Image (cartoon, rainbow, N blue to C red):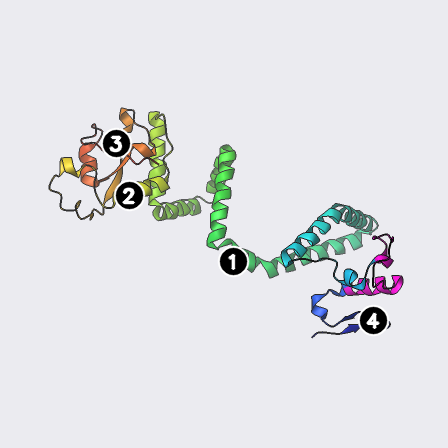
Amino acid sequence: MAAPVQLVGGCIFLDYWRHFGYNFLVSAILHLAGSGLASPRKSGANPLEPSSLTWLEVCMPYSGTPEEIRAKRHAKHMSTYPQRRAQILAQQQATVAAMTPEELAAYQERRRAAVRRYEARHRPKRIARKKTPEARVIRAKEQRARRAKDPEQARALSRALYAKDPAKAIAATRKWVKAHPEQVQAVLQRRRARIRGAARNDVTAAQRKLVLAVAKGRCAYCPHYKPHCKLCPKGAHEDLTVDHITAIVNGGDNTLHNLAACCGSCNSKKNKKPNPVPVQPLLL
């Protein structure tokens, strides 16, 4: 409920308590009561002196849009934060140093209890935020960046997790493999190309999906192996696979411009033989 506050003898009347913090109101009242109100700015007065500020400037020190006000408040807070933090830490250290062992134990227990209460109050919200699609994307991006920055540490962490609970690690891996078949194929292809010494080895799962989407259900090799295919004219192939136009074993690269979409039977017939028909690679 809004509580009106009136300064007797002054020209300020605030009746929206919820818009102003208690501390701010008390500070403003004490400031105005101690220094007096100056309705206009005094000519030649120091703008930093309390007597040169109007009551409106004391109660509403920031002007502009809500975004600008938040930015000004944040800037002021950050400008004084290091000094205030150092003072608070020094005061806390002095207080702790003056405690007896019994008082120190009780103080530490109160701190731990406060942390437990905070965790119990905020943990559900934090877990819910982490499960949102946006948070998952950001977390996956951060994990990829960490793995790229220090792959040895990432491998060591994976080995440690596996050693801690092998069954859980195997179950998680199987679940991921089942849910991401295209990424699994991309990983296997990159591994095979790396073993074969391919000059370029940069195909991603998204690029493999793009090759299949551009094909629109039509096989690139059916005109040679199955001239009378009834599915290609209709774009009805549902088992299209991604093939290397020049096989990796023949010196081909595992890159986007060396990929083509074809049905499973044509892929098996071609195997590692040269390309039977001219194919326009996907160039992006």
Q: Residue at x 48, y 55 (%)?
A: 132
Q: CA separation, marks 1 and 2?
A: 37 Å
Q: Which structural element holds mark 1?
A: helix
Q: Nearer the viewer, mark 4 or mark 3?
A: 4
Q: Could you tell me the amino acid type at mark 2?
A: Val
How would you rate the neighbour count of disc 4 (Cα within 10 Å): few for under 14, some for 14-19, many for 20 or more? few
How would you rate the neighbour count of disc 3 (Cα within 10 Å): few for under 14, some for 14-19, many for 20 or more? many
Q: Which mark is residue 245?
A: 3
Q: Which range of residues does the magenta coloring cover?
A: 25-52
Residue 18 located left or right of residue 213: right
Task: Give the mark nearer the N terminus: 1 vs 4.
Answer: 4
Task: Give the mark nearer the N terminus: 3 vs 2.
Answer: 2
Q: Which mark is residue 128?
A: 1
Q: Could you tell me the amino acid type at mark 4?
A: Leu
Q: Could you tell me the amino acid type at mark 3?
A: Ile
Q: Quadrant of the C terminus?
A: top left
Q: CA separation, marks 2 and 4?
A: 74 Å
- Between 272 and 12, which is closer to the camera in this rendering? 12
Q: Which mark is residue 7?
A: 4
Whole-percent x, y for residue 135 in the image? 50, 51
Q: Nearer the viewer, mark 2 or mark 4?
A: 4
Read off the residue under disc 2: 214
Task: Give the mark nearer the N terminus: 1 vs 3.
Answer: 1
- Mark yes or no: residue 157 visible: no
Whole-percent x, y for residue 110 in the image? 72, 57
Q: Quadrant of residue 38?
A: bottom right
Q: Nearer the viewer, mark 3 or mark 2?
A: 2
